[in-house]
Image (tube, coloured by chain):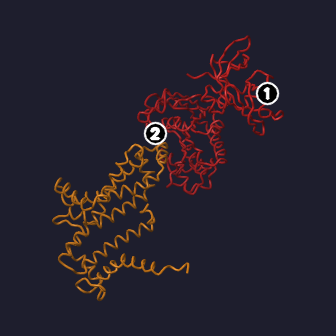
Amino acid sequence: MQNKTHPLLIAFAVLVFFFLLGPLVIIIGSALSETSYLTFPPQGLTLHWFENIFEISAFRRTMATSFMLAVGGTALSMLIGIPAAYALARYRVEIPRFLGNVYVLPILIPEIVLGFSLMKSLATGLGLPITLSLLVGHALLVLPYCVRVVGASLNNFDFSIEEAAVSLGCTRAKAFFTVVLPNIQAGIIAGFILAFITSLNDVSVSIFLTGPGVSTLPIQLLAHMEQFFDPTIASVSVLLMLVTVAVMAIVERTLGLTFLTK
Amino acid sequence: MTVSLTLDNVSAHYGSTQVLEDLSLHVAEGELISLLGSSGCGKTTTLRLVAGFLQPTAGTIRLGDRDLTRLPAHARNIGLVFQTYALFPHLTVRDNVAFGLKQRGMGRKERDRRADEMIARVGLDALADRHPANLSGGQRQRVALARALVIEPPLLMFDEPLSNLDAKLRVDMRVEIRRLQQANGTTAVYVTHDQEEAFSISDRVAIMNAGRIMQLDTPEVLYSKPANAFVADFVGFENMIPMRVVAEAGDAVRAEMEGGATMDLPRGTFDVPGRDFILAARPEGLLVAPEGSAPGIPAKLGLRTYLGRAYQYQCDTPAGSVMANGPLSAPFDAGAAVTLVPQPDQCCLLPVEA
């Protein structure tokens, strides 16, 4: 009796899994259906709707934009985030704490507010072209992940290692590239992946910054849904899901998922 | 290449706090000097100034005939050994040791040869291809030592290099450090808070307090003839008895201690530094003898403890409580009235500081 799990607990666990995974199963099912409308369980099996993504030029274009934003925005964010994380860790004593927290603001502020304020400042205020303001907006959106995850690596880094390199003849800059960067590599990769996924799946910020002719995949998905209710929507969702899962799998295989929760 | 290290009137500040005050220090060619003191005394600051990780607010630092004061850290060519070892985690032992040679533009073949040679000298031949994570603390510090030595620096500096090792290993490693330093004839600065460590391997030791050197001398002199009350206390002179000269009678000086008791100190054996002075003594510097058998401090014995080589007594004197040792052959009982006879070679008379 002791080792027997209570039936209610089992039921509870099943419910949790049902509600977590159920919608995903329904989407995957719908994406495979032969019908021209969304239905579950699927009637017949086809990959037609996946092909359809690539046949609709708007999806092709926005997919390219989304990947470009995810890679470019994250890269831009890393260019700011790595030096910021470095300074925050290296000069922990000298730098006031609140300055470190400034970098987390994009997570704390409601995304819709962030999106709106970015539209006001970047697009209408500075009058930046759509693609550029999207790029800057995404870079800001993912900055907290870059600073925090890279920062976690740097907090475990013994800076006397850097001083040892300097004492052996490296300039400060060279020491950063030869001994600091290789030892926070794992943090940079993990931060990059988290940021990439966040950017790729973002709606709230993008919806304010997209404009005529330029959109992202999730936004295009919303637009498509207003006109059509075919399984293409489900297949795009599955595609986004697959990219996320694939990226997570890479992290798991190389670094371990626990790395992200550190 | 052996050179001397000279610090002239160096001061340093953290913000508005002065951490080093007008410090001057000369380390002769091939000499090993320890900077000894408790945390916050300025010893690590001194080392970081010489290494170039901190800038002095005044003064000059010279290595041989090179002025280091404004030279960036990477151009100073000083071998450093850190408390945390500071090995490069992503490099093998061989690449760690060869790192400095690589920075000097040496080809792979030659630097690997020199690195392997140095790794053999610190006894780690079998481990050259391992990464630091797979080494014990002692092995890591040997790698750090090899890494600092292989660039043949004119100056070696150690920042509490043994603090993270266990007691047995500490003794082995400090002997190893001394052996390698002497074999190369490298000038060295060694920072530690461990008195035994400093005294055992140094040519001279600078005892530091509050950003100043209190005394710089050989371990032997520091141990037996501290120059001031701080150093005396630091090296274990537990008893400090304030005294005042009241009369000079021929070949002796009569001194009075608090509470009114007097004692004759023969000239020649005791060198009285002024009218007011402090008699500093370790417990073994005050011999417990039968009352009146020799000039000394009158005392009443308290608790007796057995030390193996002697008995130690807690004694009540007119000047307060002191610790004194008595011979094993003649134990005294608690409550006995005795005289504590200062042993000239184990006591010192210190000036009263202003």
The x and y percentages for residue B253 are: 70, 15
Relative to A236, is B196 on the left or the right? right
- Type of amino acid at the residue the image marks with label 1: Ala
How far apart marks 1 and 2 lie (CA) works out to 56 Å
Front-most of B126 and A8? A8
Relative to A119, is B48 on the left or the right? right
Give whichever of discs 1 and 2 has the lower sequence position: 2
Residue at disc 2, secondary structure: loop
Task: Provide the chain ID for the residue under circle 2.
Answer: B
Q: Are marks 1 and 2 in contact (CB under 8 Å)?
A: no
Front-most of B141 and B301? B301
Q: Which residue does the numbered mark 2 point to in the structure image? A: B53
- Type of amino acid at the residue the image marks with label 2: Phe
Chain with colour red in the figure: B
The x and y percentages for residue B47 are: 51, 37
Task: Provide the chain ID for the residue under circle 1.
Answer: B
Q: Where A239 sits versus B173, above or below?
A: below
The x and y percentages for residue B156 are: 56, 38
Chain with colour orange in the figure: A
Quarter of the rendering occupied by the N terminus of chain B: top right
Q: Where B274 sits versus B176, above or below?
A: above
What residue is shown at x 19% (from left), y 65% (from top)? Answer: A214
